[in-house]
Image (cartoon, helix red, strand yellow):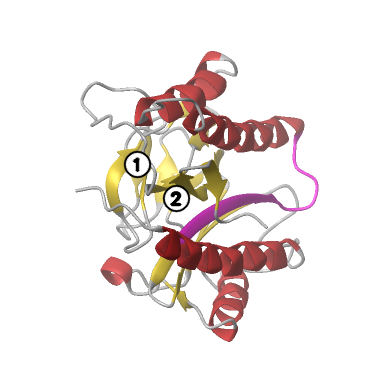
C-alpha cells in the first residue's frame, strides 16, 4: 500500500533530507586518494548523529554500517572497510539514509576520486543526468511511475548504450526506509504503474553500468557488483509529489 504524506510530514522529511544533503556535501571535502571507505563511513556517521539524526542503514536487516560505500564495479551495498583505500581514478557511490524525528530521507552521490578516465567521468555525468531526467518526468501532467522509468532508461541505454540495473529499484520512502511503490529504471508490464499523486514521497535512484545491466552478489550477502567487472554509478534523490508540483527533498 502506498503511504501518502501530508504537508507536515513532507516538511519533516525535508528536514531529514537537509541533514543528508549537508552530509553528502561534507564528504565532497574529504573524499580523496588515501582515505578508506571506513573513514568515509565514520565521518558520515558522526555528521548525522551530531545533527540529531540516526543513520537508518545501520542495523537495517543486519547491515553493519551507517553508509553503503560502493567503489568502481560495486553497484550498491558496498560495506565500508578499513582495508579499502581509495586511489586516484576510483569512483565511489555513497548511499546514505537519515532518520530525523522519525522521518526518513534517502540519497546517493557518486564521487570521483582525483582525476578519473574520460569514460568513467562520462558514465558519472550521464547517471546524474538520468536522475534529473527521471525527476523532470515526474513533473509531467498525469505522470505515472513508468514515465520516470522511461526517462532514465532512454537516456542511459537508448542514447548512451549503458546497462540499466533491473534487479534493484527506487522506492517509496518517508515513514520507513523502503515503502511502496517500486520506482524502476526500466519499463516493465510486470511492475505496478500507479499514477503519481500529491503526498507520494519517492526515492528515485538510477543505477547505471558501463557494460552489462547484469549483476552478481558477493558472499557477504550485501555487496552487489557488475557481472562483467566494469564500473557502475549510482545517483539518488528523495522527491515529494505535491499540489504545486515536484520538490527534491535531499537537495540544498
Q: Position of residue 192 (x, y in %)?
A: 23, 31
Magenta stretch, main secondary structure, is strand
Furthest-right residue in view? 115
Of marks 1 and 2, which one's residue comes earlier in the chain?
2
Label of residue 168 in the image: 1
Residue 174 visible, this orientation: yes
User: Could you say where residue 250 lies in the image, as x and y percent from the top left?
Assistant: 57, 56
Label 2 belongs to which residue?
Answer: 76
Q: Is residue 97 above or below residue 163?
A: below
Q: Is residue 160 magenta?
A: no
Q: Nearer the viewer, mark 1 or mark 2?
A: 1
- Quadrant hosting residue 175: bottom left
Q: Quadrant of the C terminus?
A: bottom right
| Image quarter of residue 21 | bottom right
Q: Where are the magenta residues, as a range?
A: 105-117
Question: In terms of secondary structure, where does tag 2 sit?
Answer: strand
Instruction: Mark 2: give few (<14), some (14-19) or many (20+) Cα within 10 Å.
Output: many
In the rendered view, tell whether residue 113 sits above or below residue 21. Answer: above
Amino acid at each position: 500500500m502506498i503511504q501518502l504524506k501530508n504537508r507536515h510530514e513532507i516538511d519533516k522529511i525535508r528536514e531529514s533530507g537537509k541533514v543528508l544533503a549537508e552530509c553528502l556535501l561534507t564528504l565532497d571535502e574529504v573524499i580523496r586518494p588515501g582515505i578508506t571507505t571506513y573513514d568515509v563511513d565514520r565521518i558520515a556517521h558522526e555528521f548525522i548523529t551530531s545533527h540529531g539524526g540516526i543513520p537508518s542503514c545501520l542495523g537495517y536487516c543486519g547491515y553493519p554500517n551507517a553508509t553503503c560505500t560502493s567503489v568502481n564495479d560495486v553497484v550498491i551495498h558496498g560495506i565500508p572497510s578499513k582495508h579499502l583505500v581509495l586511489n586516484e581514478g576510483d569512483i565511489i557511490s555513497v548511499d546514505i539514509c537519515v532518520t530525523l524525528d522519525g522521518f526518513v530521507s534517502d540519497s546517493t552521490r557518486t564521487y570521483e576520486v582525483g582525476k578519473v578516465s574520460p569514460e568513467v567521468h562520462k558514465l558519472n555525468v550521464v547517471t546524474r543526468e538520468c536522475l534529473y531526467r527521471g525527476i523532470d518526468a515526474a513533473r509531467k501532467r498525469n505522470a505515472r511511475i513508468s514515465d520516470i522509468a522511461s526517462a532514465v532508461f532512454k537516456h542511459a541505454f537508448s542514447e548512451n548504450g549503458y546497462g540499466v540495473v533491473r534487479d534493484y529499484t527506487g522506492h517509496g520512502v518517508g515513514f520507513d526506509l523502503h515503502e511502496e511503490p517500486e520506482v524502476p529504471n526500466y519499463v516493465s508490464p510486470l511492475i505496478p504503474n500507479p499514477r503519481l499523486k500529491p503526498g507520494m514521497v519517492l526515492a528515485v535512484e538510477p543505477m547505471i553500468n558501463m557494460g552489462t545491466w547484469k549483476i552478481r552478489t558477493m558472499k557477504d550477502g550485501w555487496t552487489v557488483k557488475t557481472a562483467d567487472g566494469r564500473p557502475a554509478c549510482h545517483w539518488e534523490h528523495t522527491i515529494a509529489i505535491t499540489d504545486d508540483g515536484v520538490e527534491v527533498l535531499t537537495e540544498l
